[in-house]
Image (tube, rainbow, N blue to C red):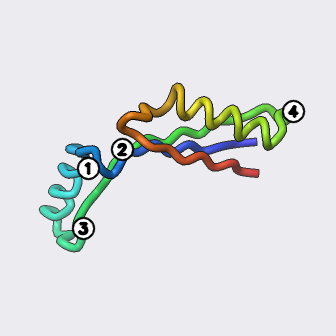
Amino acid sequence: MKARVFVTFKPTVLDPQGQTVCSALNGLGFPGVSSVRQGKYFEISLDDAVTREQALKDLETIAHDVLANPVIEEYRVELLS
């Protein structure tokens, strides 16, 4: 089983890298881009013996305690078949 974890800044947190990318895209001729938020992506492989329920529980713990800083970041976990 595979999972994806996406970690991004909370909407209230300033994202200077996203602002820089947005400015660069505007300068490259893409004036329709009004904002960019950057983040992190993790792909995690799980043992086939792990149940879907246990995988979700473990991944929520991993994302909250290890991969994201819950003070300034939010995360989303996706289980793939």
Q: Are marks 2 and 1 in contact (CB under 8 Å)?
A: yes
Q: Residues within 10 Å of mark 4 (few under 14, many from 20)?
A: few
For the residue labelled by badge 3, is the local secondary structure a helix, a strand or a loop?
A: loop
Point out the frontmost of discs 4 and 2.
Answer: 2
Marks 2/3: CA distance? 19 Å
For the residue labelled by badge 4, is the local secondary structure a helix, a strand or a loop?
A: loop
Q: Residue at x 69, y 48 (%)?
A: 79
Asked which quadrant contains residue 44, the reply is top right
> Which of 48/74 is in front?
74
Q: Residue at x 45, y 43 (%)?
A: 74
Instruction: Give the label on residue 18, or none.
Output: 1
Q: Residues within 10 Å of mark 1 (few under 14, many from 20)?
A: some
Residue 25 location in percent, x, y?
21, 61
Marks 4/3: CA distance? 44 Å
Residue type at the position of mark 1 = Gly
Among the two numbered marks 1 and 3 on one chain, the one whose residue lies closer to the N terminus = 1
Residue type at the position of mark 3 = Val
Residue type at the position of mark 4 = Ala
Instruction: Give the label on residue 49, or none.
Output: 4
